[in-house]
Image (cartoon, rainbow, N blue to C red):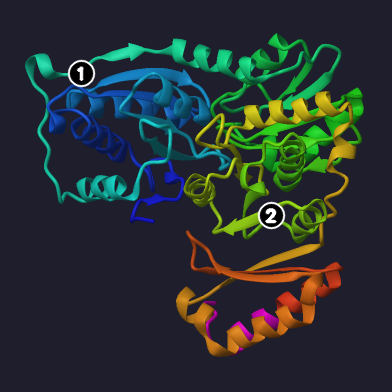
Amino acid sequence: MGKYFGTDGFRGEANVDLTFDHAVKIGRFLGWYYGKRLNKKAKIVIGKDTRRSSYMYEYALVAGLTASGADAYIMHVTTTPSVSYIARVDDFDCGIMISASHNPYYDNGIKIVNNNGEKMDEETILEIEDYLDGKIEIPVAVKNDIGMTVDYAAGRNRYIGYLISMSKYSFNGKRIGLDCANGAAWFIAKSVFDALGAKTYVINNEPDGFNINTNCGSTHIEGLQKFVIDHGLDCGFAFDGDADRCLCVDEKGELVTGDHIMYIYGLYMKNRGKLLNNTIVTTVMSNFGLYKALDKVGISYEKTKVGDKYVYENMVQNGHRIGGEQSGHIIFTKYATTGDGILTALKMMEVMMASKKPLSELAAPVKFYPQVLKNIRVKSKPEAQNDPKVQEAVQKVAEALGDNGRILVRESGTEPVIRVMVEADTNELCEKYVDEVIDVIRAQGHVSE
């Protein structure tokens, strides 16, 4: 990760951490990098979520792009995966999404994808950061070289058509709930499910610029759980602010996480001979219960660092077809280069329709282990993580858990925090073992009070 960009773009509080000037400069750099630097005119597509500040960043990026000679194509309010898709299929040099995903409305972010719809490579990101820090000078466009702005709502409509084409089944007769988080999926998701014949019930689809993710969407699943029960629905799907994640609710109102989704669709692929390498890619934060369930059906798995970026890299390098995070960020490399919440919902419907089974039955084999995760602020993350006494305490817990749980100690990517997580047979055991390790971190003098 760089100075400004993390694993999922440049993110922070609007006009505090991520400013209007940052956006102009990012546009300036990308317009030059893909245009004048190569003696051509760059063509770059932009999407945004429903935050009030997204409009400010959209215009700032457009100003920067056109000032450097690029043509800026605006998709308006749309999802992150739609920008990724359109950048790939409509021959753009790169794509930009303005969103802070599941963060509150006052945060925002700038995500950049390449012409394959993949997250931008580290080398290019570091060059952008050098320009932000004044280490690089680039020329402005003049006369006929100044870029233009193009309304590209047609790209969003094309993406909707692509999603509709992904379904092998009509959803006629199915009663489906959608929680759009007052975000980017607010009308796209309903359009897709309506077109496929579902009786669609939608909540949190009235964005006002300030209510994105507020007590709704995939980070507040309890609203959809109640909605599914109250209306007797077959299932429900909840998205985050930019709709690259999806969590599900079964007909009984129970949560179906990203781990359940990977199990359900992975087994579906295996049974059809479509699970290449017989492997699912997870992060280290997937629940121990997922691995137990995969072991029982003979599916292998790999574990990456936290972040869909690392999941995707593993999948591409090894030719795997499905992977993701417990949070609902699921990647199907046959169909997309990033997580896509609406596509994930369609894939869950596909399994339900093909198997003629309710979602609760499909998810039942994954028995979640109790999990306790605690954060402790430290003076130095590497020193705390590598302290021999701390490592000894972690090893002691791992040996005590054996095959009936696990411990994970990792550094936060964005805060001066060590995260200690334990999964075990009971919450009491989880608490006990987490506290044992934290006590050692504290006793060794690493805590920042």
Q: Where is residue 14 in the image (x, y as percent from the top left)?
A: 42, 40
Q: Where is residue 201 in the image (x, y as percent from the top left)?
A: 78, 19
Q: How crowded is mark 2: few (under 14 residues within 10 Å), some or many (20 or more)?
A: few
Q: Is mark 1 on a helix, strand or loop?
A: loop
Seen from the viewer's position, the closer of residues 59 and 150 is: 150
Q: On the image, which quarter does residue 168 sit in? A: top right
65 with respect to 16 (left or right): left
Q: Which residue is drawn at 78% across and 30% down?
A: 351
Q: What residue type is labelled 2?
A: Ser
Q: Which amino acid does label 1 sit on?
A: Gly
Q: Residue at x 14, y 33 (%)?
A: 37
261 with respect to 233 (left or right): left
Q: Which of marks 2 and 1 is nearer the N terminus?
A: 1
127 with respect to 275 (left or right): left
Q: Find disc 2 in the rendering and name its residue.
A: 300
Q: Quadrant of the N terminus?
A: bottom left
Whole-angstrom CA distance, mark 2 to mark 1, is: 50 Å
The span shown in magenta is 436-449
Q: In which quarter of the image is the C terminus?
A: bottom right
Above or below residue 89? Residue 413 is below
Q: Position of residue 80 (x, y in %)?
A: 50, 31
Seen from the viewer's position, the closer of residues 444 and 83 is: 83
Q: Find disc 1 in the rendering and name its residue.
A: 147
Above or below residue 120? Residue 281 is below
* Magenta highlight on residue 146: no
